[in-house]
Amino acid sequence: MLAENVDLRRLDTLIEINTLINSDYSDPNALLTRIVESATRLTEGEASSLLLINPDDNKLYFEVALGSKGPEVQRFSLNPGEGIAGWVVEKNRSLIVNDVETDQRFFSNISKAVGFSTRNILAAPMRIRDKCVGVLEILNKKERKDFTESDLWWLEIFANQAALAIQNARSFQKAREQIDLLSVQVTESKGYHTLVAMSPAMLEKIDLVKRVAPTDSSVLILGESGVGKELFAEQLHLNSRRADRAFVRVNCAALPESLLESELFGHVKGAFTDANRDRIGRFELADGGTIFLDEIGELPLSLQAKLLRVLQERTFEKVGASEPISVDVRIVAATNRDIEEEVSEGRFRRDLYYRLNVLPLYVPPLRSRPEDIPELAQFFLKRLNHETKKQIRGFSDEAMEQLLSYSWPGNVRELENAVERAVVISRGDEISPDDLVLQRGQSDGARYEGNSLKDAVNMFKKQYLRATLGRCEWNQTVAARQLGIQRTYLSRLIKELDISRSE
């Protein structure tokens, strides 16, 4: 009767895990841990581990390790054929060893290093299409008993379930990445970019964009070079009633003054030397849609008056023509300059500034929104993996610490370049600090060493907020404006992070 109860318990657990595998494989590590826990409990083991083969170096790495020394065991790896796990992989066969001291296949180095005494081992291969991809091990049957053939039979079933979970998770991940990449490719093929954001400061800006977008009011986007001002201009257009019409971009700093007027407003044949035919300007092309004037601070004073007329009257003349042209265009402008200083110095028309600045939008620099750094880095890595045909799975803890502690003077554009450089250089399956090649003197990762990602981010936020508050003489309204966040959100951060002036 006792044996029947045990088998029924094992069967119930197996059905439960099978249901989980077929319903949710979005978190494979949690599912594998659940399988190993169940296998350990039902075979009455003291400790257990699940090892997977890394196809790059063919080594076995501990994906899950349970028991008193589990976290320490996960630091180790096994070479092909090394130890009982290596033998199981090599032979693709299960194994019971009830006295490891008399078995030459037993590799004692790990047990000795972590201070765990191993008596007996039960090991079964995990197979995907008959190919061994890893090993499920149970160590030390309780009450100093021997493992039985029945234990091995059940372990093999759990190993098959683990292999199925891995296969489903890999298929799910591959499909999700392909969908994400397809979405990015479709978006970018239409000339738009994917806006990646996780920080409260950026999510607040995105919410503001969605509220502002349906209007026709002009928007002036402010922020340092490389923060993503163009992406916000795109979102303003895509969330507006003009989304199905043209979105026309003009970089005012990229064209000489002699060509910029013709580029913006067009010209008629014979208007100047080399004007061999009529030309349609960007404003006319944008009729019914949106025109994005990037680096508006570079616009010459002579053209600022003409732009002001477009804003006020929605009309302009082509170069060399006297007949006015009417357009229905929403104007979104951006600059990395201190535009108020440009106005006070007389380099930018005050009346134009006020017409453009109906709805100002400040995009904060990357250094003040560290929560976005991991998300952006992973986004760029996925895209570059696809472009370079590499399979780099992520960033090492040390590399991520370096990314979080770097000041990013070039903002998101510099981060993208750093990830691209790292992908090209990297020879492993994850990005290391050496692969990043960040400028010396910009990183101070030592202070974050040993902390979780969440704690490291909070440390950075606390340091950065205190520095900003200090510069603003602890005036929270001024500091919030500089940080690009609401004053109420800044007050909440000060309380949550326990920031005090007396520190």
Image (tube, helix red, strand yellow):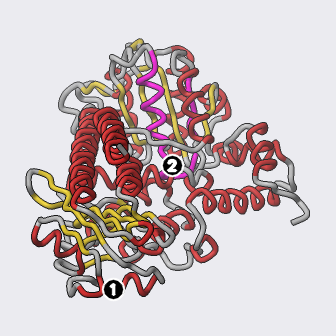
Q: Report crowding for label 1: few under 14, some 14 to 19, many 20 or more residues within 10 A (C-alpha).
A: some
Residue at the spot of label 1? 108
**x and y percentages locating residue 134 in the rendered image:** 22, 63
Residue kind at label 1, given as amino acid type: Ser
Residue 78: name its quadrant.
bottom left
Vertical relation: 457 (above or below) 379: below
Is 149 drawn above or below residue 435 in the view shown?
Answer: above
Q: Residue at x 38, y 38 (%)?
A: 194
Q: Position of residue 109 (x, y in %)?
A: 35, 87
Mark 2 crowdedness (10 Å alpha carbons): few <14, some 14-19, many ≥20? many
Viewer-side residue, 384 vs 101: 101
Q: Residue 480 appears in which quarter of the rendering?
A: top right
Q: Quadrant of the C terminus?
A: bottom right
Q: Nearer the viewer, residue 25 or 5?
A: 5
Q: Residue at x 66, y 29 (%)?
A: 354
Residue 223 sits inside the magenta stretch:
yes
| Mark found first going from the N terminus, 1 or 2 | 1
The residue that mark 2 highlights is 227
Q: Nearer the viewer, mark 1 or mark 2?
A: 1
Mark 2 secondary-structure assignment: loop
The percent position of residue 501, horizontal first and vertical second, equals 88, 59
What range is drawn magenta here? 218-240
Q: Is residue 205 left or right of residue 233?
A: right
Q: Is residue 379 visible?
A: no
